[in-house]
Amino acid sequence: MRRWGAALAAAALLLAQGVRADTSLMSMATGDESRGWEAVGRLNLGNRGFCTAALIAPDVVLTAAHCLYDKTTGQRFPIAQMQFLADWRLGRAAAYRGIRRAVQADGYSYAEANRVTQMGHDLALLQLDQPIRLPSIQPFAVADGNLHAGDTVAVVSYAQDRAEAPSLQQTCGVEGNRPGVLIMSCSIDFGASGAPVFVRRNGVPVIVSVISAMAEADGRRVSLGVDLADALPPLEARLSATINGTLVETAPVQATGGLSGAAAPGGAKFLRP
């Protein structure tokens, strides 16, 4: 566990040394600005807040597992209270969809969500009640990023103080990795949970991670993302089995997680964005 804290401290040191010039967040409030990113949307959670999510199939969105839970009760949100707003900008969305079913990664526990061992499992897939088949909204491909310290990524997210339009950080960096988790310099805030992390392949953005948490290390903030290489394939199989009726997905009642912040070994502090 101490190694994790050391990894975050090393990431903070890299940031302090200025090894990469990260770009600032750019609001995408117009159609021209958001072109190509329309499959990112806001996932509304009743009147309790929102997360960020991304379309990866006409009827499937990808987000963080902890977004499925009400932090005040520790219980799963009823799917009837969830809504995906594709390309939400200034009070309007390109498509509005309810949620038919939601599955989380096997082994994820909301009650244990502040433990570093849970970071690599903080992943969920949501099936929409109707597919989105609009020429302007094309699902993103998902790829094994095989990322390492020094690699460059991009993030599109909604967050507090910028909840009415998505923001793009065109360039931020991978500062390190641990099994199942990427440590990044990307700028995120509350509401950015579930935000897709991209790399470009042949000029096309593909998703390689999903934002799980913020962390503070030596007074500096870094972002933590789920490495999709190992986590996503079994989750896709789980959703398929649920749809086909060979697996019944339950919504376990969890103890209140208290996810506003939790101390971790090594002097790091994890915060759910």
Image (cartoon, grey):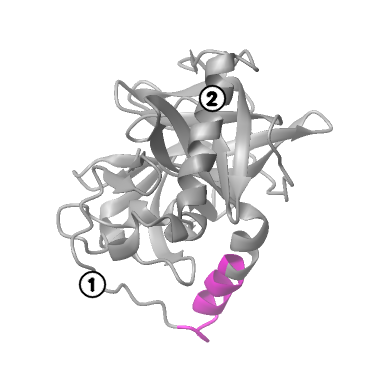
Q: Label 1's element? A: loop
Name the spot of residue 250 as percent of width and height, x first: 35, 77
Q: Main secondary structure of the magenta part?
A: helix
Residue 107 sits above or below residue 59 on the image: below
Please give the name of the residue rendered at 52% of the width and 57% of the height, measured from the top-left corner.
120
Name the spot of residue 214 as percent of width and height, x first: 40, 37
Range of residues picked out in magenta: 235-247
Q: Is residue 63 left or right of residue 255?
A: right
Residue 52 sits above or below residue 125 on the image: above
Residue 247 sits above or below residue 183 on the image: below
92, 57: nearer the viewer: 57
Three-letter code, disc 1:
Val
- For disc 2, the marked residue is 13
Name the spot of residue 23 as percent of width and height, x first: 58, 14
- For disc 1, the marked residue is 253
Three-letter code, disc 2:
Leu
Magenta span includes 83: no
Q: Label 2's element? A: helix
Dot 1: few (<14), some (14–19), or many (≥20) neighbours within 10 Å? few
Q: Is residue 130 left or right of residue 271?
A: right
Q: Quadrant of the C terminus?
A: top left
* Quarter of the image where one finds residue 31: top right
